[in-house]
Image: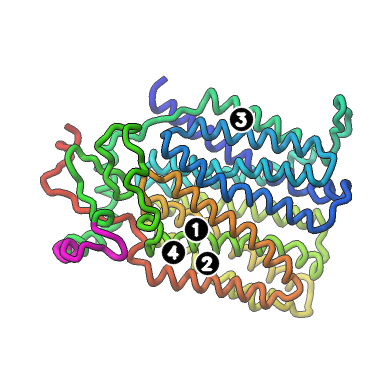
Amino acid sequence: MDYARKKKLTNWTIGLIFLSSGIEYAVILPTIWAYLQLLDAEPYFLGLCLSAFSFAGLFTGPVFGYWSDRRHQTKAVILFANLFQIVGNFMFFIGGSKWMILSSRLVAGAATGVSASIFSYLARSTNSQERARVFSTVMACRQVGLLIGPACNLFLRLCNVQVGPFVVNKFTSPGLFMCLVWLLLQILVMVMYHDLPPPTLPSRVVAAASHDVLEEEEPLMQQEAGHEEVAESGSYGSTSAEHRVPVLGDECRYVPNGHLADEEPVGEKSPFEDFSSTREYLREEVVVLLTAQFIILFNQMALETMLTPFTQQYLGFGDLENSIMYFLSGVEVICSFFLVRCLSTRLTDRVVLVIGLVICNMAGVWCLIFLAQPRAGSFAVLLAELVVGIFLKVLGLPFVAVSQMSLFSKVTAEKTQGLSQGLRRSVGGIATILGPLWAGGLTGNLYIMLGVMMGLLSLLTMMVGLSYTYLVEPPREYQSEVTQDECSS
């Protein structure tokens, strides 16, 4: 089997993994509260179960990422992580007590850390200009799963059979269904997924060089004019020249994110031999992007938490109306991801990030004005105000999510990309835990809740504005004597 076919099968498998994760979320979430009530669980147990799923990923993300960096393998990590999904969902199917349900979500949540390894593989196997497109497509796959999940529940809720000692009903069937889905996916990973080496470096060098000349002309010109000053001061921005101004060395050993490839063959030198976490992560641009990851997810989860009580209190929405609302929001998210995919071919990541922040700020101001204290009026007016607020929030999310992820992969070292993506995943996990807790306690005081969300968003916007010049792939000096023909040779 040739390289192109292996890569295509691998990419399809990655898409199926994210599709399945979206289906699981949409299949488990609608029935878990009723399932817990059947087991005499207290109301706070729902929050514990939802938080446990995200909590487990906080620790497994960096571990799985570190594993893939050390072993230069992603397939083994995926196969191992899928075991947690299989076991966790089978525990959910068995049930029996509220503690079993809590444990099942904790075990299944451990598998979410595998996304760090997958995104590190995608970062290593793509060049700068195509990375945002690939990331947006993968993230859209999960959104498609969120739409498919409710359709699966239509037939799962009809189950009512006895299988040996186990009862298969509308509460336990989602666990059995997802257990079978992850078992099937385990087989597909074994057959279709391949640990492929990165594309040949010379072609990536030429592509990266032409892309930077076309889309990053101003920073490159500034760097070329001020190279002597940079060399004398020994720094560019907030990091050493060793990382900021890498030179295209012998045999075109340049890799897309600005770090030189190791001379030793893969596997002979540990990627962490000269690694410094403070030098790698305590940099201005990295801190800004991690902050963006936290604030955007925090606001998203807080909004999702307050939305159902809001619609119930002010609009009288029930399960059907809320399901339709979430379905339409899911369709918009998918369209937004593909819009970002198209724009990423024409705009740089930081421009896409700014566009997303502008939209999110518009949504925050709108919600603060019209939704923090709904005015007594007609149903249609309040519904229109809510629709506009949700539309803007959902529209801006993919712009920020994709651009910050793509930029993060470019400003961090490629050889430790797994650990870096694991750190990013953990920061997002903390946000998904704190967001619902914050909103859940303030559904009766929306001014404070939405005001803090708007304040965080304003802080992020200011940070991006002040660090805008650093939110690019690290500049590099191309040797004039290195031509495309020399690279090819």
Residue that badge 1 annotates: 399
Q: Are marks 1 and 2 in contact (CB under 8 Å)?
A: yes
Q: Are marks 3 and 1 in contact (CB under 8 Å)?
A: no
In this picture, residue 37 sits left or right of residue 445: right
Residue that badge 4 annotates: 288
* Up-down relation of residue 359 to residue 99 (above or below): below
Q: What element carries label 3?
A: helix
Residue 185's disc is 3
* Up-down relation of residue 401 to residue 248 (above or below): below
Residue that badge 2 annotates: 359
Label 2 vs 4, first from the N-terminus:
4
How far apart marks 1 and 2 lie (CA) works out to: 9 Å
Label 2 vs 3, first from the N-terminus:
3
Q: Which of label 2 and label 3 is nearer to you?
A: 3
Q: Crowdedness of circle 4 by 10 Å Cα count: few (<14), some, many (20+)?
A: many
Label 3 vs 1, first from the N-terminus:
3
Task: In the displayed orientation, state which residue is furthest to the front.
Answer: 273
How far apart marks 3 and 4 lie (CA) works out to: 36 Å
How far apart marks 3 and 1 lie (CA) works out to: 30 Å
Q: Crowdedness of circle 3 by 10 Å Cα count: few (<14), some, many (20+)?
A: some
In-front residue for pair 160/88 = 88
* Up-down relation of residue 154 to residue 387 (above or below): above
The amino acid pointed to by label 1 is Phe
Residue 65: give x, y in percent of width and height: 48, 43
> Bounds of the magenta span?
227-241
The amino acid pointed to by label 3 is Leu
Label 1 vs 4, first from the N-terminus:
4
Q: Do the residues labelled 2 and 3 touch (CB within 8 Å)?
A: no
Q: Is residue 160 visible?
A: yes
Q: Is mark 1 on a helix, strand or loop?
A: helix
